[in-house]
Amino acid sequence: MITLAVAMAACSCLVRAQNTDSLKRVLWSAKKADTTSVGLMARISAAYTDVNFDSMLFYAGSGLGLAQTLHYEKGWAYSLRLLGLGYEHKNEYEKAIAYFKDALVLYEQLQDKGQQTLVLRSIAGNYYRLTNYQAAIDYNNKSIVISSQNNDLSQEGLALIDIGGIYTDQTNFSQALNYYLQGLKVFEQIADYRGMSLSLVNIATVYSGMGNYKMAEEYLNKAIPINENLKEREVVFANILNMGVVYGDMKNYARALSVFNKAAILADSIGDKGWENMVRANIADAYYHLGDFDTSFAIYKTVLEQAKELNDTNVLIMSESYLGRMLVKKGRTAEGLQSLLQSLAIARKKQMNQYIFDIAFVPDRTPTL
């Protein structure tokens, strides 16, 4: 099963969608193009986040051009950051990194440490999606240094959680636990319940990955009441998804499936295709372990196609390998081995060691269909 361990910032797509028309009217009524126009274009671009990525990029690019003409560095930097976010949402991670790095240079010149920490974490997040884990860790560590200098404990805690998530993906559970506990301590200092809930659930996922289900359940029980009172749908979604993973690790697949179905409803309401597909992959995994292979196979086929579109390596490897093992047991050995070898090749190319051993030995451990 796949966890969602990287910390996220909450957003409200509804509010953004409602603001675009009024902001456009103000922009069009302006008598001259000035720094105010740059700010309006940036606000319109931000309003299109998760609504229309092409429009988001158009207004960010327009704002960038005007900011450069006016030598308005603050608007220039923010427009670059918006372009980075737009390409991140379009799963064009290398382009996103390039824009974020350009924005970082300007924010360093402006000595804006608050924006520097945000951009550094964005760069780290995109390197993570490219499975360049060391670069992701390096940029998160840079964010921690700047956050500490700026006394921004919230961003410091989120970067710590992000690093914990990377180590979780690498099954380096001792390091993951170390960073999650550091993050929890930071969030407790400032009574940040969102951060506390993320930390607690991720600590539970680490303990379940280590096979210490007693400690996993203890941390889940601490997180559940906090999670129920959170308003940020993205954070609630991440926590619910990871709770399902913990129940799966405990081999309580019926409960895991129930939790994943709740996560699916939330993912659909948020409208993030990557999260929707991640939930479907976990639902397919739960059905597989419950012995409903036909349902699992059908879901995994859909998941695989979506993962290819989204360039989601984790989900792609998981779905390809499970389809492979089911094809082998169906007697379609050639097809099954091809899927298994494809998933193994991707895992090796991306140096994703957490998958390599599992894929290499799956035929011996695949339940009979």
Image: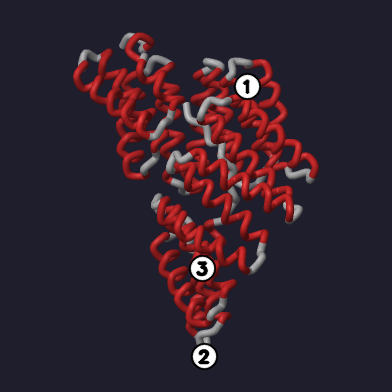
Measured along the vertical axis of the image, is residue 14 above or below residue 354? Answer: below
The quadrant holding residue 53 is bottom left
x 59%, y 18%: residue: 210
Q: Secondary structure at mark 3?
A: helix
Mark 1 vs 2, N-terminal side? 2
258 relative to 155 in the view: left or right: left
Q: How many marks?
A: 3
Q: Residue furthest bottom?
A: 31
Q: Secondary structure at mark 1?
A: helix
Q: Which residue is mark 2?
A: 31
Q: Which residue is mark 3?
A: 79
Q: Which residue is mark 1?
A: 207
Given the image, on which type of amino acid does mark 3 rest? Ser
Given the image, on which type of amino acid does mark 2 rest? Lys
Res 309 seen here = yes
Where is residue 311? Give x, y as percent. 36, 43
Q: Secondary structure at mark 2?
A: loop
Mark 1 vs 3, N-terminal side? 3
Structure colour scheme: secondary structure
The quadrant holding residue 72 is bottom right
Given the image, on which type of amino acid does mark 1 rest? Tyr
- Of tags 1 and 2, the one toward the viewer is 1
> Mark 1 and mark 2: span between their CA atoms?
61 Å
x 56%, y 61%: residue: 104
Locate the C terminus by quadrant: top left
Mark 3 vs 2, N-terminal side? 2
Where is residue 59? Give x, y as percent. 45, 70
Res 19 seen here = no
Dot 3 crowding, Cα within 10 Å, few <14, some 14–19, many 20+: many
